[in-house]
Structure formats: structure tokens, C-alpha cells
Image (cartoon, rainbow, N blue to C red):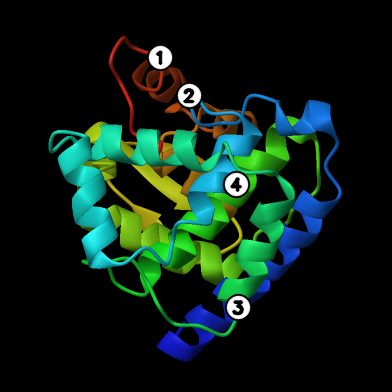
Amino acid sequence: MDRDDVWQTIDDERRSLADLLDDLSAPEWATPSLCAGWRVREVAAHLTLAHAGALSALAWLVRARGDFNRMVHDTAVRQAELPVDRYSAALRGMVGSRRKAPGVSHLEPLLDILVHGQDIAIPLGRPRPVPTAAAATAVARVWAMGWPFHAQRILSGLEIVATDHPWSGGQGERVEGPIASILLLITGRRAALSSLSGPGMTELEDRLAPRPGSDRQR
């Protein structure tokens, strides 16, 4: 995907997620998401912070004593105190803008909206298809970037193969599935396991087993 295609997809995904949020009931807002410790409400709140400026980000980081994961968590929790009808409006307000958080490429907003959209939709049982080309672009970004996911290190010794797109990564025992599921896998979501298969699954399930202090999901 070229840059224009990426931004168009981000716009489309923000619109469709805003539509989904408009339809949520009070119990659905309180449903645990795929992000450990976050309800659907916190995930939606986090996505509305995508246009934060450098000064705000710096102030939040100082408040979190330099801990990036804590900053992401704390800002989402604070933003989640807003009325829930504010989140869909905020997402729609971003459509058409190419503004992004400081220090990231145009691919990080794509990654955020694709993965966090699934963090919301999957626990709710809401259908939310992931565009194949967009998922592949996000997978390539995560696979290459290292921190904060370290996918190549965590999945070393396994070959990860998409069944619906010409993408593969790593070497070893094979694990295969849809590219959208691979995106969830390499960002640490155990929900991906149900749609993957192959001789490397036993090893994969062990590696993704929850461990104290582990947080690769945001």
C-alpha cells in the first residue's frame, strides 16, 4: 500500500469503528477487551488520543515517570472518564486528517486502528473484517520494527505463513492462517490462536501463555 492508500484505509476504519461504537450498549462498553486490563471503553478512549501533540505526549510521559507503557495505560484510563458518546465523534473528527502522534510513521495509526478495532470487536462477537492488504502492510511493519512487540524474537524458530496473502516470516516449524490473524498473533493477542494451525502450534501456544508482568499488547 502506498501512503495515500494507507491514510484512506485509516479513514475508512475510523468511520466504521465509530459506527460500531455508536451501537454499543452499557454492558458492551464494560466488556473486557483483548488488551489485558482494558475494557472496550479504555480501548476506544485510547484511539481518540491519536492526534496528541508533542507537548501533551511529553507531559504525559513525565507524569508516568518516563515509563511508556504506564503512560499509554494511564492516558487511556483518564480519557475513559469521558462520556462514551464522545469517542465516536472524536474518531469521525480525525477522518481526512494526516496528523499523527510525534515520533511515529504513517503506518502506526494504521496498526493502531486495525488491531484495536479487533480488540473491541472480537470480545463483543461483532463482525469486523480486516482488509487483507492493510493487514499485510501492518504485519510487515510490526515484523520489522522490534520494540514494543519484538515479534521476530518471540517467534524465533517458527515459520509464520499467511494463507490468504503472499507473506511469510521466520524459519522453523510452520504456523499458518489468515493475515488478519497473523497481525493479532504478532501483536501478542492469544485470540489469534483459534484461527491458526500447523506443526508449530504447541510451541506457539506455550510462548504466548500469559506470564506475570508481560505486556506486549499496546
Rounded to the nearest angstrom, the CA distance separating label 3 from label 1 is 36 Å
Counting the numbered discs, the total is: 4
**Nearest-to-viewer mark from 3 and 1:** 3
Could you tell me the amino acid type at mark 3? Val
Disc sitting over residue 95 in the figure: 3
Answer yes or no: is residue 198 visible.
yes
Residue designated by label 4: 44
Quadrant (top left, top right, bottom left, bottom right) of the C terminus: top left
Residue 130, image x and y in percent?
65, 59
User: Which residue is at 37% across, 34% downward?
Assistant: 74
Could you tell me the amino acid type at mark 4? Ala
User: Which residue is at 66% across, 70% downward?
Assistant: 92
Q: Earlier in the sequence, mark 4 or mark 3?
A: 4
Residue designated by label 1: 210
SS of the residue at dot 2?
loop
Residue designated by label 2: 36
